[in-house]
Amino acid sequence: MARSNSTHMKEAFKGTWELSAQKEAFVKDSIERCAGVKVLDVGFGAGSTEYIKGSSGSHGFDKAAPDLKVEGTNLVIEVSGPLRSMSQKADLLVNTSKVEYALEHPELEYWFAHSNGVTRNREGVRMIRIGKQFRQGMDRGEICYTQFESRGMQQMFWSIPADHYTVCRFDTFLMYLQDRKTK
């Protein structure tokens, strides 16, 4: 029996779960501490370093659903990005299924926390807002579909220029959350 693509990818990245969980915890803790809001683990495996067999669907989760949710809001966050450090000027690569999920759920205010390597400082995290402006950037060719090899597999990503208007610094996002909380 052939494994599904999602299970195959999950197996290929099995050894990186601990590092990915560290990135997720850093983003969650920073948001709670700096913006003063409660962040919930809502995605399949979010908040855990444990390897969970099977697909997200086999555990009652939507494929590509986000990791985190700001309590009492429609704001959700997917934590992603390379496990190795890259130039701050390099394009940000985002998994196509995650973008597809975000665009199919316009009722959500969907953000990607793109963490550059396993960072312990906010400068290494950039936020990408996935919504109407992101879709317009795709339609205008500013955000491109690209192929990238990782762990011996060809994967498709959306490539977002680091200076694109849908990208902001993590500190800017934190100030946005603080402001939103007071309204």
Image (spheres, rainbow, N blue to C red):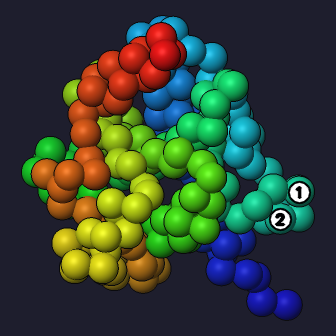
From the viewer's perspective, tell me whether residue 180 is left or right of residue 117. right
How far apart are the two marked residues, 1 and 2, measured between alpha carbons? 5 Å
Quarter of the figure with residue 119: top left
Around disc 1, counting alpha carbons within 10 Å, would you say few (fewer than 14), some (14 to 19), or many (20 or more)? few
Around disc 2, counting alpha carbons within 10 Å, would you say few (fewer than 14), some (14 to 19), or many (20 or more)? few
- Residue 120 visible here: no
Which residue is located at x 85 percent, y 90 percent? 1
In this rendering, the answer to whether 161 lies above or below 87 is: below
Residues 121 and 182: in front is 182
Quarter of the figure with residue 168: top left
Q: Position of residue 121 (x, y in %)?
A: 30, 22
Numbered circle sitting on residue 57? 2
- Residue 127 visible here: yes
Which residue is located at x 62 percent, y 52 percent? 107
Q: Position of residue 39 (x, y in %)?
A: 62, 24
Which residue is located at x 76 percent, y 61 percent? 62
Q: Position of residue 174 (x, y in %)?
A: 37, 22
In this rendering, the answer to whether 173 lies above or below 46 is: above
From the viewer's perspective, tell me whether residue 171 is left or right of residue 62. left
Secondary structure of the residue carrying numbered label 1: loop
Which residue is located at x 81 percent, y 56 percent? 61
Query: Dots 1 and 2: beta carbons under 8 Å?
Result: yes
Amino acid residing under circle 1: Gly
Q: Position of residue 79 (x, y in %)?
A: 49, 43
Amino acid residing under circle 2: Gly
**Circle 1 is placed at which residue position?**
60
In this rendering, the answer to whether 161 lies above or below 30 is: below
